[in-house]
Amino acid sequence: MKAVLFDFDGTLADTLPCIYHSFQEVFLKYDNKKLNDEEVRAMFGPPENEIIYKNLEHSEKEKAVEYFFQTYSENHERLVKENKEVTKMLHELSRHFSLGIITGKSRRGLEISLEILGMKHYFDVLIPGDEVKNIKPHPEGVQTALASLHAAPSEAIFAGDSDSDIETGIKAGVHSAGAQWLPNLQQTSFTVKPDAVFKHAEEFEVYCLRQTE
């Protein structure tokens, strides 16, 4: 195996509480709407700016986008804590494999999180949702990452916490891994069956390292 690819939110970082909070603040400020976490999650898929443009009724959408990123950045350290198991996993896997992120998150949102969490140096390729024509579960993001890393689908695994991630991996022809090691997940079970499900980041780390033996 050459490449280990990851989703980001809910897989590598427990960012979902911060994302929920940021969207809730935007919709409260601009549309005077109180959204619960489930209502925010139902909008997930495209990058943050597209979610706002598609769902916000207020005309000042660009200002709302800026307010989202301001809120996300300002609350990140308070709401998103480092997961030491994930940090250890990335450290170990980066010594043996090329690592990549394929996310629906925008480049801007991803960079905010990677910078604050000190994770960016682990990754060889980043494929955010605003730099592909087709978001997950379309395989474009995984295929783009594999091309960049000069890896065949059979030489890669993609780990994520949602059915969309698993479906993406299957469509791209890579091994698929269900990631259920963080406190806040998009889904607690999968309707699309991955090749394997991991409850702890350390288990996934060991699984990948065995592929080098």
Image (cartoon, rainbow, N blue to C red):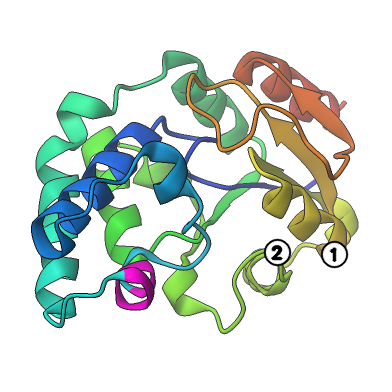
Q: Could you tell me if the residues under marks 2 and 1 are in contact, i.e. CB atoms within 8 Å? A: yes
Q: Nearer the viewer, mark 2 or mark 1?
A: 2
Above or below for 62 versus 75 = below
- Of 143 and 179, nearer the camera is 179
Query: Residue 137, labelled with which disc?
Result: 2
Query: Residue 171, labelled with which disc?
Result: 1
Q: Locate the C terminus and report the quarter of the image it occupies.
A: top right
- Report x, y in % for residue 57: 24, 75
Residue at the location (34% across, 64% down)?
48
* Residue 60 located within the stretch drawn in magenta: no
Query: Residue 72, labelled with which disc?
Result: none
Residue at the location (74% across, 18% down)?
206
What amino acid type should be assigned to the residue bearing mark 2?
Pro
Above or below for 47 versus 164 = below
Give the residues drawn in magenta, as a range.
Answer: 50-55
* Residue 54 located within the stretch drawn in magenta: yes
- Report x, y in % for residue 119: 36, 39
Name the quadrant containing residue 17.
top left
Helix, strand or loop under label 2 = loop
Q: Residues within 10 Å of mark 1 (few under 14, many from 20)?
A: some
